Amino acid sequence: MQSLQGARASQCHFAHSRCLSRASRVIGAHRATCRAAAAPAAPASAAQPHQAVPHELPLFPVQPIGVFLPGMTKTLHLYEPHFIAMVEEAMASPHKLMATAVLEPYMGGQQQPGSSSSPDSSEAGGSSGSSGSSGDSSSSVEAEAERAASRGEDAAGGPGSFVGGYNFSLSCGCLVQVLSAKPYTGGYLVRIRGEGRLGISGLPQTGPYMRAQVYPLPDQPLAAGEEGRQALQRQAEHLQDIMRDVQNLSSKFRCDETAALQQAMRWLHGSPLTPGISAGPAGLAGDGAAAEGAGALMGEATAAGAGGEEMEGEEEEEVFDPELAVRLSWAALQWLPFSTTEERMRIVRSRLLAMDTRDVAARLGLAAEAMAEARAALAARVALKEAAAFGQ
């Protein structure tokens, strides 16, 4: 009898031990999951390495009014056979990338009315850039012309432009990712998103669709010095405040423009496929190294411990990421809900000017001016809508 009771006690003790072991494993796994969830997210620019841009890509030409910018998302209905072949090639590739560019008549260096290389472009760039002597300006223009000529480009048409023969030019190149392509009435509904600016150095194929030789065209590196860096940060914060107001006002309307604006703001904090700004002096390059530990535009300091406990005795410095400032300058230039034709044309002009400059400070100022004006018009429309709803 005693041996039977001892055997039962031994079995109960063994079962109890197994239950405790299983419970400890479950608790340990739960704690590990909580720690992983509480850990600060990696910065967007450091989440993934930059993707190598293929040397040749299918090219979708657009008119100046349809200039495509990084951060823009658009759905196209393509039904012509050559465009269908272009989309099928892009979708069959592992990277699902293509390019867009503004196609314009070329008149031997003469300016086109309303083109991306209008006289206002040089004035805007000159007013926002750093001042210098006329000799330095002319020498830099000549140097840029020589570099452009060596690549078969037209310096007068903007950075990265290409002259094909003597009758047309390609400018404002943009790297585009094909997000989806769904069959629709004999063609495709293609959803694309701009990822970065491109330069065009050649056009090896023109039929049945265009293929272009391309290369990344990031912004110029930031000048050495803390003053310029702080000034750029203030510009980015100012534009961020404007876009916060624009988002709040746009949320009053349900339309395609509101959805496009929200998608652009989400793209802002995504992982860049290509660098938006050239590497410069140590600590100023927009290659993601300076953004370590930053998860927002201004790199707000994070102090998250396991289980939500605050870390004591450790303070993280705020880090300014020029890469995200570049992306903000692109993503901000969006059409707003129920804009008039005149307001849309102003945004188009700002987009063309933005593509013509490689100075991120100049583009931030351009975007802030354009979107502050658009914000005022949108606020007036919201006020009218609320007054009409109150009257009913």
Image (tube, rainbow, N blue to C red):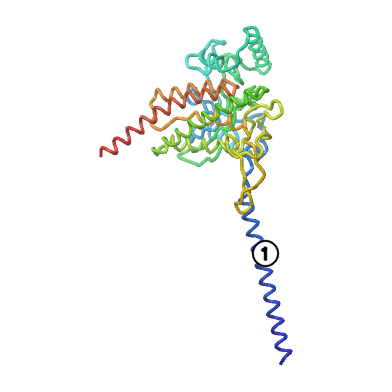
* Direction from residue 65 to residue 126 in the image, left or right: right
Counting labels gives 1
The quarter holding residue 175 reads: top right
Q: Residue furthest right?
A: 3
SS label for mark 1: helix
Query: Which amino acid type is shown beneath numbered disc 1?
Result: Arg
- Dot 1: within a 10 Å radius of its alpha carbon, few (fewer than 14), some, or many (20 or more) residues? few
Question: Image height check: is 116 above or below 180?
Answer: above
Q: Residue furthest front?
A: 313
Q: Is residue 208 visible?
A: no
Please tell me which residue is depicted at 26% across the width and 37% down the height of the picture. Answer: 391
Q: Residue furthest left?
A: 392
Q: Please name the residue that numbered disc 1 is placed on.
A: 25
Question: Image height check: is 125 above or below 238?
Answer: above
Residue 117, position as x, y percentages in the image: 54, 16
Residue 72, position as x, y percentages in the image: 52, 32
Q: Quadrant of the C terminus?
A: top left
Q: Nearer the viewer, residue 44 or 110?
A: 44
Q: Quadrant of the N terminus?
A: bottom right
Residue 158, position as x, y percentages in the image: 58, 18
The quarter holding residue 216 reads: top right
Q: Residue furthest bottom?
A: 1
Residue 124, position as x, y percentages in the image: 53, 16
Q: Is residue 86 visible?
A: yes
Please tell me which residue is depicted at 30% across the width and 35% down the height of the picture. Answer: 387
Question: Image height check: is 14 above or below 170?
Answer: below
